[in-house]
Image (spheres, helix red, strand yellow):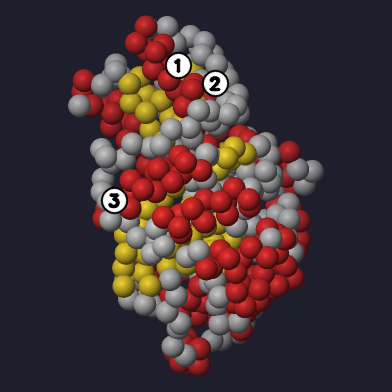
């Protein structure tokens, strides 16, 4: 099929997808040199200058469907010089931030749900599906790749479209839905309408969603109902507990807010699964250790996939961080082939710690090691830099048996 294709489109919504997509595109190019290759998604437009050199023929960012259909027509007609919303070698276009006419995804030709992650609850696994109720985000966190594309705009997907997509997946055996919105409570009323309708039609289906710390606190009155409707857990981008870091990222919450949100979620009975980015130019060894202590003392280790303790700031082309006043103090050169700007921590110990933690987490993942044991190995590495020791075996024993909480079988991180 690839050898006969006139056009191949590849979705690149995240950095990992972009790296994989590039490999696929190069393979397509080797099989079919004449095919037009189009990347669409957040990272397509941010990295278009480099990708258009020899990897792809077109890039689309934002609400891609309309521009993509126009590009398909243009390829058929052999006239791809200038298409609104499509960046090519001949013509540049910004992101297409206009409301599209949403349609329910056609999933019949995709791999079946048993090829993807599952939800594990008390040792029982159920197939997990995925859908989105909104696109974009009304917040403008400076490190987020959504910000330079949507600039604070978001679009609600009609309720009937979301439910139609869920019905298709339930027919395929899905028992859990991940709402993949950047923030499920960008439109809390919209989110609640969908979850109420979902529960009414499929009372046995559970779901998870991503919600900002500030939205959890602001809309706390909705959380008990969210639990009653089948919410298995909530992901929230905590990122750091260093308030200086949070200010630099313009996250909209403080470390005190995180502590309050964790207590609130425990009271409601919905597990909170924090996502983290503990390696940035503003994080310190002291604040990294404080982060580890925070989750250990509250017995929250099992609510965080170990990979989150190894996440390092990515600064793609076009990032809002490039415009910050202090960026010349820490920002290096653009490494176009790696799709990110290079940067070094002012304390070289933090860069060394990152390398060690990333290697440890990767090995632990391959060995299917205990997340609790992995956590204390990470803590031992951090404390060793400050001249302190941790007996990992003793620490694991003192922590005790981890709680068994609902979780996906595949780690999620940006």
Q: Find residue 36 and report its image quarter.
A: top left
- Inter-mark Cα distance, 1 to 3: 33 Å
Q: Are marks 2 and 1 in contact (CB under 8 Å)?
A: yes
Q: Which mark is residue 85?
A: 2
**What residue did someone put label 1 on?**
70
Residue 253: in sight, yes or no? Answer: yes
Q: Are marks 2 and 3 in contact (CB under 8 Å)?
A: no
In the rendered image, the vertical position of residue 130 relative to residue 82, given as above or below: below
- Residue 365: horizontal and vertical position, in percent? 37, 67
Q: Earlier in the sequence, mark 2 or mark 1?
A: 1
Along the horizontal axis of the image, is 356 left or right of 382? Answer: left
Most foreground residue, 224 or 120: 224
Disc 3 secondary structure class: helix
Check disc 2: other Cα within 10 Å, few if <14, some if 14-19, many if 20+: many
In the rendered image, the vertical position of residue 118 relative to residue 44, given as above or below: below
Q: Are marks 1 and 3 in contact (CB under 8 Å)?
A: no
Along the horizontal axis of the image, is 271 left or right of 39? Answer: right
Q: Earlier in the sequence, mark 2 or mark 3?
A: 2
């Amino acid at each position: 099929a690839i050898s006969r294709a006139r056009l191949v489109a590849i979705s690149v919504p995240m950095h990992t997808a972009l790296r994989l997509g590039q490999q696929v595109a190069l393979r397509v190019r080797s099989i079919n040199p004449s095919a037009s290759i189009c990347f669409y998604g957040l990272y397509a437009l941010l990295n278009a200058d480099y990708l258009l050199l020899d990897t792809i023929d077109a890039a689309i960012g934002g609400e891609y469907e309309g521009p993509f259909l126009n590009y398909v027509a243009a390829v058929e007609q052999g006239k791809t010089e200038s298409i609104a919303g499509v960046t090519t070698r001949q013509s540049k276009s910004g992101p297409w931030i206009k409301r599209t006419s949403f349609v329910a995804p056609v999933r019949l030709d995709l791999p079946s749900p048993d090829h993807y992650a599952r939800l594990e609850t008390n040792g029982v696994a159920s197939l997990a599906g995925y859908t989105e109720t909104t696109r974009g985000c009304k917040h403008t966190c400076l490190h987020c790749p959504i910000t330079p594309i949507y600039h604070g705009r978001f679009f609600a997907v009609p309720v009937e479209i979301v439910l139609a997509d869920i019905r298709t997946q339930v027919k395929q055996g899905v028992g859990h839905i991940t709402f993949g919105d950047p923030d499920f409570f960008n439109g809390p009323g919209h989110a609640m309408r969908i979850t109420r309708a979902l529960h009414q039609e499929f009372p046995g289906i559970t779901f998870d969603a991503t919600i900002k710390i500030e939205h959890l606190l602001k809309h706390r009155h909705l959380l008990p109902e969210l639990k009653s409707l089948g919410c298995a857990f909530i992901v929230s981008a905590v990122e750091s507990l260093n308030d200086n870091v949070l200010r630099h990222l313009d996250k909209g919450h403080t470390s005190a807010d995180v502590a309050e949100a964790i207590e609130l979620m425990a009271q409601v009975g919905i597990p909170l699964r924090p996502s983290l980015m503990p390696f940035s130019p503003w994080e310190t060894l002291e604040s990294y250790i404080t982060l580890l202590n925070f989750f250990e003392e509250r017995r929250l280790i099992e609510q965080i996939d170990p990979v989150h303790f190894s996440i390092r700031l990515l600064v793609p082309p076009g990032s809002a961080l490039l415009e910050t006043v202090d960026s010349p103090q820490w920002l290096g050169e653009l490494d176009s082939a790696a799709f990110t700007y290079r940067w070094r921590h002012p304390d070289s110990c933090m860069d060394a710690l990152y390398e060690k933690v990333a290697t440890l987490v990767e090995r632990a993942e391959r060995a299917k090691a205990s997340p609790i044991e992995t956590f204390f190995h990470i803590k031992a590495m951090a404390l060793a830099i400050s001249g302190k020791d941790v007996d990992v075996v003793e620490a694991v024993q003192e922590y005790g048996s981890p709680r068994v909480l609902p979780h996906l079988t595949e780690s999620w991180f940006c």
